[in-house]
Amino acid sequence: MMSSAELSDQELVYLDWNNALEVLEKAYKAGLFVLIIGPKGTGKTTLVRKFASTMNKDLHSVNFSLRTRESHLVGTKTVEHGQISFVEGVLVKSMRSGSMLYLDELNAAEADVLLRLDEALDDRRQLVLKEAEGQTIKATADWFVIATINPLSHVGTKELPPQLLSRFPVRMRLEYPPEELELEIVKRHVKLDESKIRSIKHAIQLARNLREAAAVEELYYSPSLRETIAYAKMLNAGLSARHAAEVVYANAYDQWGQVEYQKVMDMITSIFGDK
Ligand SMILES: Nc1ncnc2c1ncn2[C@@H]1O[C@H](COP(=O)(O)OP(=O)(O)OP(=O)(O)O)[C@@H](O)[C@H]1O
Ligand SMILES: [Mg+2]
């Protein structure tokens, strides 16, 4: 669990470039759960943390790509010194305390886990614990749930069952920001002097070209805001503009072979010039 006081600077630098916080706040006040859909590194997690801290709510997080089990979510029975007790899972803790529950990469959840969520998230907002003698857990009135999913185009993603989708009637799309705003976001993370701005703009241009190529399946990988931020840090650490582009962008494509890698190196040459 994370309380607002423990949030790092990282979360507080969130730039709300498309008024996502306003939509979240309205959904929260209306008691409607929210689904955020967006490719990796578009700021989903950062947005949720920022929102929790803005609303002064505790945050419980679960990431389903980490093969979260039902026992982690709901809880487990334990026996200690002959005493049987029930250790509450994240979902139960969150419902009871009325915290904000963040279900990250929900479309990666296993079927048994989805079933329990389905029950807890329906309009009654309650859960019957078969693990604890059928005890019923009822969520507090201010309990709030936000889930994220990556778009289906991503390799290995499953679709969210319609049943569960309907539990999140407010849906937000998060995309990569426009160029000028991507630069503003980088500036919030990395202190940059004027001489570096031109190179960062080039890196953003490269990242956009790579994202476009990945969107039409000309390349396998689409760089996110993480790469742009890393690029700025490598520049600050003293790497040349072109060299930083090679280590942050091009080299990753080598895992799909020489042709893929060369395509990206050519893009780098056209943007940054020769070595
Ligand atoms: N609007 C923004 N303002 C400030 N920083 C941002 C913003 N969007 C993204 N970032 C930064 O970009 C990086 C990636 O963001 P984040 O981890 O929130 O993305 P994500 O969508 O949750 O990614 P994933 O799908 O891989 O979990 C972080 O360093 C984050 O702080
Ligand atoms: Mg995330």
Image (cartoon, grey):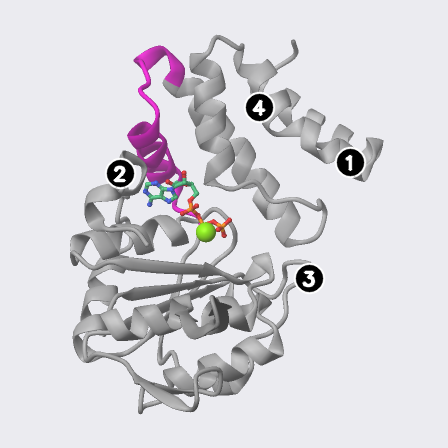
Q: Give the Cα separation between the discs numbered 2 and 4.
A: 29 Å
Disc 2 within 8 angstroms of ligand 1 (CB): yes
Visible in this render: residue 233? yes
Assess disc 3: are there few (<14), some (14-19) or many (≥20) residues with their C-alpha within 10 Å of its C-alpha: few
The image shows residue 180 at horizontal and vertical percentages of 34, 36
Residue at the disc numbered 4: 271
Q: Give the Cα separation between the discs numbered 1 and 4.
A: 23 Å
Q: Amino acid at mark 2?
A: Val
SS for dot 2: loop
Residue 4 shown left or right of residue 39 in the figure = left
First reached walking from the N terminus: tag 2 or tag 4: 2
First reached walking from the N terminus: tag 2 or tag 3: 2
Q: How many marks?
A: 4
Between disc 2 and disc 4, the foreground one is 2
Residue at the disc numbered 3: 156
Between disc 4 and disc 3, the foreground one is 3
Residue 52 shown left or right of residue 265 in the figure = left
Which range of residues does the magenta coloring cover?
A: 176-196
In the image, what residue occupies the spot 21% across and 78% down? 140
Q: Is residue 210 above or below residue 70?
A: above
Q: Give the Cα separation between the discs numbered 4 and 3.
A: 32 Å
Assess disc 1: are there few (<14), some (14-19) or many (≥20) residues with their C-alpha within 10 Å of its C-alpha: few
* Quadrant of the image occupied by residue 169: bottom left
* Residue 140 drawn in magenta: no
| Residue 13 - label | 2
SS for dot 3: loop
| Quadrant into which the N terminus falls | bottom left
